[in-house]
Amino acid sequence: MEQTNNRSEKRNKIIYWIATLWLSLGMVATGIVQLIQNKEEAAMFSRLGYPMYLLTIIGVWKMLGVIAVLVPKFPLVKEWAYAGFFFVMTGAVFSHLAIADAPKELFGPILLIVLTIISWYFRPANRKVVPLNK
């Protein structure tokens, strides 16, 4: 039974790190594109109806969120980072749906939502918020 638990823990750790590294890569890549206000990204943001200064805000918060998720400790900050990733990416999906964008525009945000959920779900106990005693 103990061997099964060890295998399960090892599997969960592998799933966590794969999802977390892919999530981090996706958030850093899109955050950089937003921070440098890439032409295509700026055009898409404009098409969605958002002000250009929001690109910088979202780009900075994505970078800070990646740092929060990757560094050890600070589980409450990690929870906020995961929530921020989820809110920004679901916002992106609904924004694309609102202007009837092509389905291919939904792939990136949906992938990042899935990776956020997987990373959050499989995170090790030392990266979780400890609930207050009742």
Image: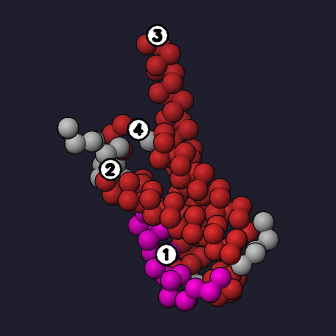
- What's the residue at 58%, 51% (across, down)? 115
* Residue 56 locus on image (x, y percent): 49, 82
Q: Which kind of residue does numbered mark 3 sit on? A: Met
Q: Is residue 95 shown to the viewer in this render?
A: yes
* Residue 134 locus on image (x, y percent): 20, 38
Mark carried by residue 48: none
Mark carried by residue 124: 4
Residue pointed to by mark 1: 58
Residue pointed to by mark 3: 1
Q: Is residue 84 above or below residue 23?
A: below
- Quarter where residue 78 is shown: bottom left
Assess whether residue 60 is covered by the magenta stretch: yes
Residue at mark 2 to residue at mark 3: CA–CA distance: 30 Å
**Magenta part of the chain:** 48-65
Secondary structure of the residue carrying tag 4 is: loop
Secondary structure of the residue carrying tag 2 is: helix
For the residues labelled 4 and 2, say whether their Cβ atoms are less than 8 Å apart: no
Assess whether residue 53 is covered by the magenta stretch: yes
Mark toward the start of the polypeptide (1 vs 3): 3
Secondary structure of the residue carrying tag 1 is: helix
Mark toward the start of the polypeptide (2 vs 3): 3
Residue pointed to by mark 2: 75
Would residue 101 be found to the left or right of residue 82 on screen? right
Q: Residue furthest top?
A: 1
- What's the residue at 42%, 53% (across, down)? 70
**Crowd rating for badge 4 (residues with CA inside 10 Å; few <14, some 14–19, many 20+):** some
